[in-house]
Image: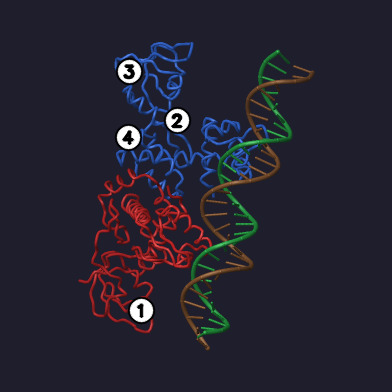
Chain colours: A blue, B red, C brown, D green
DNA sequence: TCAAAAATTTAGGCAAAACTAAAAAAAATT
DNA sequence: AATTTTTTTTAGTTTTGCCTAAATTTTTGA
């Protein structure tokens, strides 16, 4: 059985490895969890004992098969609960993160699988992020971050890969939501920012924001 | 902000005080929480510092106003989540307890008040127990435990004041559920047990079971 | 290549919440 | 009223997960 702290470490490692089994550094985890590197080292030892990660001193850490499954299950729970909050309880998309962060740690496979059915097996959460199925597999999607497209492309916003409320409120301000059409007008090489058109209006967005916008080319 | 352990203590004190501000003993709390009296003493000190209980050494403990409100809120959350599990996710009434025990600690008043609305402001949980409203008030009910009725009474089962799955499975076995009509035939004074009729069938139930059955006289 | 800088680990503490054993207070019994 | 029993509290440990400071390893770059 995993503790709350362990689950948060596994989730952080999964995120930092871009949802693969890549190696992640101690410092990166410390930054992600707003804790100290020494705390990370200790926890990694516990996770290693439980065979949830592979670890070599000074070389970084990667998820084991069972650690990956555990982490994916938490992501699945997080995203399904976000769907519940938005579609059944009328939460706004920028209000769901903190509550889902708590709900994702509830332990009951019957609960989460029933919730999945109750919601009609959604494929993405309210931010457009894919929801792993009961076997831990992601539905495939043909989207890429806006930051990876060249100029002169017309695309549709499929998702936002970050649920920080301050980002989501900013996107609301730009009138940008899932399904919005965007035209990528110009890439500014100096800072990797973009000029884009949303609803016939010219906007400038930073590289940091461009990375979070998942676009499907039209 | 209350910790998980603190919330479980407050809930135990509320239960042992019969949902009043009565004084409760250290030993009773230890028994309820399956812990040791010395642990209880320590935790009570913390709760006293936070003004959640009133406490005098060797004299027992009672909930303060804010402790009572905190504890009632947990009961409200527990019972609303039980409603959700049964009415929306098709859980059986004997499967909900452990999951609700986890869900009751989720902190978000928006969540619980939205859930209340989503469920249609239910007055009782799936076991017939009353659900405190948003202000922490119980809806009144005109039911009493079966154990407090005399012979020759016809009544309706309004609730079951215990959600131990082994009790609920036993009640299913007796074909007894919320809404069942029962005839109290005979009280056996020796052990305070009862002969009752459920669906035209004669049954014998112990005092322990009789105490859990909330009956409205017909 | 070799010293400085950065990243990581180790060592030693702290707070929460549990435990056991022992001491102290209250209640029960003779 | 005195003694025994029960209840409660205190004192001293343990585990988890965090911290700071110091030591060690790796990386960088002159």
Can the viewer see residue B90 in this picture? no
Identify whether A124 is placed above or below D7. Answer: above
Quadrant containing the C terminus of chain B is: bottom left
**Residue B196 lies in quadrant:** bottom left
Question: Counting residues from the N terminus, which is met first, the one under dot 3 or under dot 2?
Answer: 2
Element type at marker 3? strand
Q: Are marks 4 and 2 in contact (CB under 8 Å)?
A: no
In this rendering, the label closer to the viewer, 1 or 4: 4
Residue B193 is marked as 1
Q: Circle 2 marks a residue in which chain?
A: A
- Residue drawn at 37 percent across, 72 percent down: B209
Chain letter for mark 4, please. Answer: A
Task: Say if mark 1 contacts mark 4, CB within 8 Å.
Answer: no
Residue bearing mark 2: A140
Sort mark 1 into few (<14), some (14-19) or many (20+) by Cα contacts within 10 Å. Answer: some
Q: Which is more toward the observer, A143 or A101?
A: A101
Are discs 1 and 2 both within one chain? no
In the image, D30: left or right of A204?
Answer: right
For image coordinates 30% across by 73% down, the residue present is B146
- Given the image, what chain letter belongs to the residue carrying mark 1? B
Q: Which mark is residue A198?
A: 3
- Mark 3–mark 4 Cα distance, whole angstroms, equals 21 Å
Write down the residue under mark 4: A92
Q: Are marks 3 and 4 on the same chain?
A: yes
């Amino acid at each position: 059985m995993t503790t709350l702290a362990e689950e948060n470490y596994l989730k952080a490692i999964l995120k930092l490895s871009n949802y693969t089994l890549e190696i992640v550094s101690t410092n990166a985890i410390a930054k992600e969890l707003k804790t100290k590197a020494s705390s990370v080292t200790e926890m990694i030892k516990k996770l290693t004992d439980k065979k949830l990660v592979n670890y070599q001193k000074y070389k970084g850490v990667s998820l084991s098969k069972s650690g990956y499954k555990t982490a994916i299950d938490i992501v699945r729970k997080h995203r399904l609960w976000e769907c519940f909050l938005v579609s059944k309880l009328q939460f706004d998309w920028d209000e769901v993160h903190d509550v889902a962060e708590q709900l994702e740690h509830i332990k009951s496979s019957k609960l989460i699988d029933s919730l999945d059915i109750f919601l009609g097996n959604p494929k993405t959460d309210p931010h457009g992020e894919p929801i792993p199925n009961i076997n831990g597999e992601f539905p495939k999607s043909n989207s890429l971050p806006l930051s990876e497209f060249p100029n002169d492309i017309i695309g549709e916003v499929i998702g936002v890969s970050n649920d920080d409320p301050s980002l989501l409120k900013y996107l609301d301000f730009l009138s940008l939501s899932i399904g919005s059409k965007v035209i990528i007008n110009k890439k500014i090489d100096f800072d990797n920012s973009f000029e884009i058109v949303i609803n016939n209006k010219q906007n400038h967005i930073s590289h940091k924001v461009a990375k979070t916008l998942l676009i499907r080319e039209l």
